[in-house]
Image: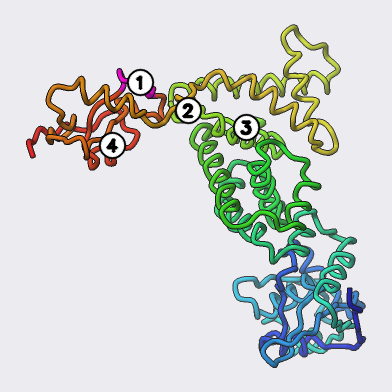
Amino acid sequence: MGTINYTSDQKTILDLQNMYQNGQLDLNPGFQRSSVWTERDRAKLINSILRNYPLPSIFLYCRNKDGNIVYDVIDGKQRIESILMFMGLKRGNRFWAKDQLSEDGSEEWIDWNTLKRRKLQHRITGYKLQAIETSGDAGEIIELFVRINSTGKALTGAERRHAQYFKSDFLKKAGQLAMRYTKYFKENGVLSSGQVSRMKHVELVCELMVSAHAEGVINKKAALDKIMQSESMKGRQLTRVTQQVVTSLNRLKKMFPSVRQTRFCKLSDFYSLAVLLQRFEREGLILTDKARNQVAWDLLVNFSNGVDDVRLKRKQLENLQPGQALYREYLLTVMEATDEINNRRQRERVLYGLLASIFQKKDSARIFSQEQRRILWNTTGVPRCSVCNKLLSWHDFTIDHKTAHSIGGATRLDNAELMCRKDNSGKGNKLTIPRRRKTH
């Protein structure tokens, strides 16, 4: 690894303003985390500046971009960003702060325009911040970022991984998927806005992707770090696991649309349910039958209520009732301080036993065999398409499942019919399509 070089200097807020407006100050380099400060945090900062209180140093990474000097913010993003917001340089993010501007010493709410009207904006623009300018190997700069941000509002695991592996194809794909499902996660109580701001939605999607790759639950920290360090998931493999995650989340949304009403909106429970649906997909279970889905939902609600009832009884030191042992077993897997892999495996085992038997399994044979094709052809009088009545030949006929394979139709002759290629393609998984009795 290289050596970091640094110099210490002072910069006024006016200097930072000019750098930002000239495109020389990057608040969001690839390794940087999202904004985590509240408006109250930002208002307290402005109050400190107006009172001329000293602030911690900001750290800037000096680099060359197309022949120009650019400064990536390593530490101090929240402070610089808050100042720019207050000054109206980041549109749509203005806020008010409290300070004593009048001679009588009373506090009042002020904004940037208030300061300008009273010709006091210099109290902001003239304020000096200690700035540490660094240069060196990019890997060392990222390590510096992680170390500096290990105190205060310390980096979450997701933020640390983002800083270290922000160029990873895997992480970029996870970020795209996380954005796609952010609204769903928030509306269903799986994640709060604060958790999303700290990249927990990206971490959840990363877990689901690695679980799809591993075909089961994972040890979160070790598995995520390993996959990103090795860059082993790329190309077709990355596309495949991405599609598996999309399928399982879409299934979950459709099968259990009111998940917010149950304990399965909690992050650890939600993860287990999503990974379980990945397993059901791999095992060829049919998850599109509305009646079976309703039964599964009813069971899930009752199970959730049972677990919550046991939790209440534990809090109130009441004895458990006969038949509550399974609820207690499940509850113990989510009461640990950390969600260890053994707990995850146990949750999956319980949920699999609860739900798997409800769903019908697809026929393991998807395609009619050559023997079946010959028998059907030779036992059909006049070979015509069952939809449009087109006369078929040996070279252009297809065999369709009367009841689609995807919804449980068996690959047997009693579920087979001749069909032209056009109508077979158009049928999809519909039980029937309108017969068009035309002779071609």
Give whichever of discs 1 and 4 has the lower sequence position. 1
In what element is the residue under mark 2? Answer: loop
Q: Which residue corresponds to the image point at 86% horizontal and 84% vertical from the top-left?
A: 133
Q: Position of residue 79 (x, y in %)?
A: 79, 73
Disc 3: CA contacts within 10 A as few (<14), some (14-19) or many (>=20)? many
Between the residue at mark 2 and the residue at mark 1, the CA separation in whole angstroms equals 18 Å
Please say if 346 is above or below 148: above
| Cα distance between the residues tagged 4 and 3 | 30 Å
Can residue 323 be seen from the camera position used here? yes
As measured in the structure, the alpha-carbon distance from the residue carrying label 1 to the one carrying label 3 is: 30 Å
Nearest-to-viewer mark from 1 and 4: 1
Question: Which residue is label 3 attached to?
Answer: 276
Marks counted in the figure total: 4
Residue 333 x %, y %: 78, 28
Image disc number at residue 286? 2
Q: Label 3's element?
A: helix
> Residue 427, labelled with which disc?
4
Residue at 83% across / 77% down in the picture?
137
Q: Start and end of the magenta stretch?
A: 409-415
Classify 10 Å Cα crowding around label 1: few (below 14), some (14-19), many (20 and above): some
Above or below for 59 versus 429 = below
193 vs 38, nearest the viewer: 193
Give residue 354's position: percent from left, percent from top: 62, 19
- State the residue position of label 1: 412
Front: mark 1 or 3: 1
Q: Earlier in the sequence, mark 4 or mark 3?
A: 3
Q: CA distance from mark 1 to mark 4?
A: 18 Å
N-terminal of the pair, mark 2 or mark 4, is 2
Q: In the displayed structure, would residue 36 be above or below residue 22?
A: above
Q: CA distance from mark 3 to mark 2?
A: 13 Å
Would you identify the image quadrant in which residue 215 lies? top right
> Residue placed farthest to the left in the image?
439
